[in-house]
Amino acid sequence: MDQKQFNAKPAAIAEDMAASVPKEFQEAFARVVKAGMKVIFSEETHEDIIQMLNKSEGDIGEMLGSQIASLMAMLYQKSNQTMPGEVIVPAGTYLLAQAAEFLETVTEEEMAPEIIAQAMQTMIDSLMRGFGVDPQQFGQISEQALSQYQGAE
């Protein structure tokens, strides 16, 4: 199986996620992404995000990952739990990449690959725990998802 070289640029991650979703889930993926983008970039939340960043004392990757996981959980609840499981991680990753790109713009600092990787790991860990995936299955899913983007090291 060919392993894609990881490109930690947020725009590349978002593009890869959108392209990786199977055709039968494209419409659901687009709906989830659209709803998530409204939350992330709405005027009501824009200022809250800036304030949260300014107050953030912890790891930016962990903060970003946990916030996107919370967003995905909220979107799942708002969908009356009809969001297909197949789009949760890809849409979350897409939104994480968009949020990371936004953070780069706001902070005028490039998001290091380590920060993106930490954010993805935190998001995936939080989502899997939140959706009740058992620990053994959870480890396999996390490793698969992360190895797809880390390339040969």
Image: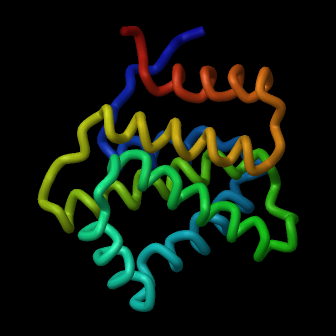
Q: Residue at 52%, 54% (x, y): give it.
A: 66
Q: Residue at 80%, 61% (x, y): give it.
A: 83
Identity of the residue furthest to the bottom in this view: 44
Quick check: 78 above or below 67? below
Q: Position of residue 70 (x, y in %)?
A: 61, 62
Q: Position of residue 104 (x, y in %)?
A: 22, 57
Quick check: 134 above or below 26? above
Q: Please state which of residues 115 and 135 is positioned toward the viewer in this rendering.
A: 135
Say whether residue 77 is left or right of residue 43.
right
Q: Please state which of residues 144 and 130 is positioned toward the viewer in this rendering.
A: 130
Q: Position of residue 130 (x, y in %)?
A: 74, 50
Say whether residue 85 is left or right of residue 70.
right
Q: Residue at 72%, 41% (x, y): give it.
A: 128
- Which quadrant is home to the C terminus? top left
Q: Position of residue 107 (x, y in %)?
A: 17, 62
Q: Residue 73 occupies which quadrant of the picture?
A: bottom right
